[in-house]
Amino acid sequence: MITQNQAYKIMMAQTRLLGSEQVGLDTALNRVLVEDVCSDMDMPPFVKAAMDGYACRREDLANDLQIVEILKAGEAPRKSIGPNECAKIMTGGMVPEGADCVIIVEKTATLDANTVRFAAESTTDNICLIGEDIQVGDVVLLAGTRLRPQHVAMLASVGCVRPRVARKPRVGIIATGDELVEPDVKPDVSQIRSSNSHQLVAQLLNADAIPTYYGIARDTEESIDVTLKKAMLESDVVLLSGGVSMGDFDLVPGIMKANGLTILFDEIAIQPGKPTTFAVSDDTWCVGLPGNPVAAFTQFELLVKPFLYRLMGHDYCPANLRLPMARTHTRQRFARESWFPARITDAGTVQPCEYHGSAHIESLCEADCLGTMPAGIASLDEGTLVAIRIL
């Protein structure tokens, strides 16, 4: 049995870029750049005013200043600034030749319609110089960047209207189990609704992958085999939920092998998620997730999500914090590393959610983080710093 960290390293070592495509700015959000983006111009491209005020010569600050023109943003100056002259200028406006500072409106006194005086003891320049922020040719975004709104603004600023991004992974989802029915079916006495597959669809969409749900495969070799073959043919990654433990009808590992997949691990020293399985072929990656929903959710967040992002060339690094426990949290079995649903209180402490085990999906509904307990630790006392992973 391997550790969670070892499982992570094994999966990351199997990744490769799936390809790339160009997209428009309005569809670039959350996509991953596959090449550096450079600026095609200086920023600012001209000397500009940082504040509303009057552009003038610093040596004339003690004198009355005659207003020679009014400049709004986007308008080129028609006059240069000479002795005891100024131009009224708006934020972002182009500073006229001859001026070396902008005195803000609040630090001036109006003498008449065309004359102002500096009315303070000192002032900063309030000028942004050409290329002060970015110079032409500078790399502004690196390959591997997952594009957030501010990155899209940067792309627009440098004229990169068709960024080249990684292709999204196509991910097939298969639920397994005779006890499962779809959510629109009222379960019989021995049945339950299939929640994992729809949870995984939502998690995949949140990870910017392309999910395809292949339905419920029954606990027979033929049903699982037929469904897996179809999913492997049409997907980059296949996620199976259930059928990976040690029961008589846990058939998934054997069927993986029969379909040319090599299993790289099939047990992790983790709670929940011990029977998580990872297998590879020349064309497809396959992850067998536990059937219990909290376990499937947790292992997706810890392993599958970073794996998918690495397929897009991005190192996924969610916020990992250390915060004090709001109350003591104990467990009876402590041989394995453990992750538990929790929420962060207004006081900045970690409050474990009510949690009855890996089938208790409701425990995740109030959680905004996962807390962890190292192997061998039976209790986290109130006030103890605990490592958490923000969801």
Image (cartoon, rainbow, N blue to C red):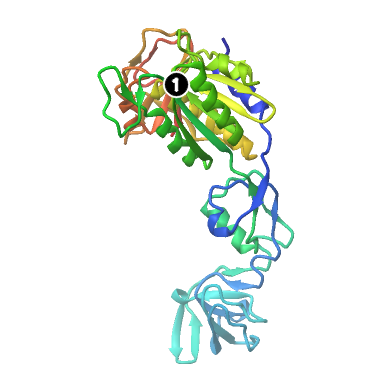
Residue sitting farthest toward the right: 137
42, 38: nearer the viewer: 38
> Is residue 381 in view from this perspective?
yes
Q: Quadrant of residue 9?
A: top right
Q: Considering the image in quadrants, where does the N terminus appear?
A: top right
Give the vertical position of 216 relative to 80 (above or below): above
The residue that disc 1 covers is: 372
State whether residue 92 is above or below residue 308: below
Q: Position of residue 360 (x, y in %)?
A: 32, 22
Q: Nearer the viewer, residue 148 or 93?
A: 148
Q: Depth check: 11 or 95 in front?
A: 11
Please name the residue shown 51% across and 35% down the image. 318
The residue shown at (59%, 39%) is 169
Q: Residues within 10 Å of mark 1 (few under 14, many from 20)?
A: some
Q: Residue 202 appears at what percent x and percent y?
A: 43, 38
The spot of residue 319 in percent (x, y) is 49, 35
> Residue 190 location in percent, x, y?
29, 17
Instruction: Answer above or below: position of 365 versus 220.
Output: below
Left or right, 90 with respect to 141, comes to: left
> In terms of secondary structure, where does tag 1 sit?
strand
Which image quadrant for residue 232?
top right
Viewer-side residue, 133 vs 57: 133
The quadrant of the rendering that contains the C terminus is top left
Residue at (46%, 75%) from the top-left corner? 107
Q: Amino acid at mark 1?
A: Thr
Asked which quadrant contains residue 43, the reply is bottom right
**Left or right: where 316 falls relative to 291:** right
Residue 3 visible in image: no
Total residue callouts: 1
Q: Residue at x 65, y 21 (%)?
A: 260
Position above or below: 192 against 348: above
